[in-house]
Image: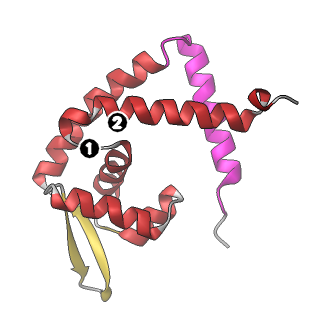
Amino acid sequence: MALNARGFFYVQQVEQLARRVIDQCLQAEGMTAGQYMTLSLVIHHEPVSSADLARRTNITAQSMGEFIKALESKGMVERQTDPANRRVIQVKSTELGRKTLVRSEAKVDHAEHNFFSCLSGEEYVYLRMLLNRVRAAQQPTDK
């Protein structure tokens, strides 16, 4: 089987292309694709620990810490000690972070629409369903 015929290879190529498109569309906001993903997760799950964010995204705690540190330095998130467990640091969005996400969502919506414009609406819905099925099947289950 030729290397370019592997599904893994296609997934990797599309992921790299998508990350580049997201990075480009968010350049004016001063954010990367990873920072955008992190800010979005913080806002939708706040207050949330860095460890929980890392688990949700299947990345290392160290990588998540770098994303949070970058967003904190830009004033988009802040860290606070969890009053229920002083060993846990919770991450929350700031007003600037929430406003930035609203602007970023509009840019990413536009970029996503253009990126997938080679597909019909029905094909795009089907692609999302298939990707979600593969992702769900590969997610570790909580025991």
Residue 143 left/right relative to 115? right
Residue 62 in view in this figure: yes
Say what secondary structure mark 2 lies in: helix
Say what secondary structure mark 1 lies in: loop
Residue 143 left/right relative to 66? right
Q: Distance between the Cα atoms at labels 2 and 1?
A: 7 Å
The stretch of residues the image draws in magenta is 116-140
> For the residue carrying disc 1, how many other residues have a C-alpha within 10 Å: few (<14), some (14-19), or many (20+)?
many
Coordinates of residue 37 in the picture (x, y in percent)? 37, 47
Coordinates of residue 129 in the picture (x, y in percent)? 62, 32
Q: Nearer the viewer, residue 126 or 78?
A: 78
Indicate the quadrant containing the C terminus: top left, top right, bottom left or bottom right.
bottom right
Indicate the quadrant containing the N terminus: top left, top right, bottom left or bottom right.
top right
> For the residue carrying disc 2, how many other residues have a C-alpha within 10 Å: few (<14), some (14-19), or many (20+)?
many
For residue 133, which quarter of the picture?
top right
Question: What type is the residue that disc 1 sits on?
Answer: Met
Coordinates of residue 27 in the picture (x, y in percent)? 25, 35
For residue 131, which quarter of the picture?
top right
Residue 131 left/right relative to 44? right
Residue 106 left/right relative to 96? right
Which residue is at the far front? 3
Residue 46 in view in this figure: no
Which residue is denoted by mark 2 in the rendering?
23
Q: Is-magenta flag for residue 130?
A: yes
Q: Is-magenta flag for residue 42?
A: no
Q: Residue at x 30, y 29 (%)?
A: 25
Which residue is denoted by mark 1 in the rendering?
31
Q: Residue at x 55, y 10 (%)?
A: 120
What predominant SS class does the magenta segment belong to?
A: helix
Coordinates of residue 54 in the picture (x, y in percent)? 46, 64
Q: From the viewer's perspective, is residue 72 above or below residue 34?
A: below
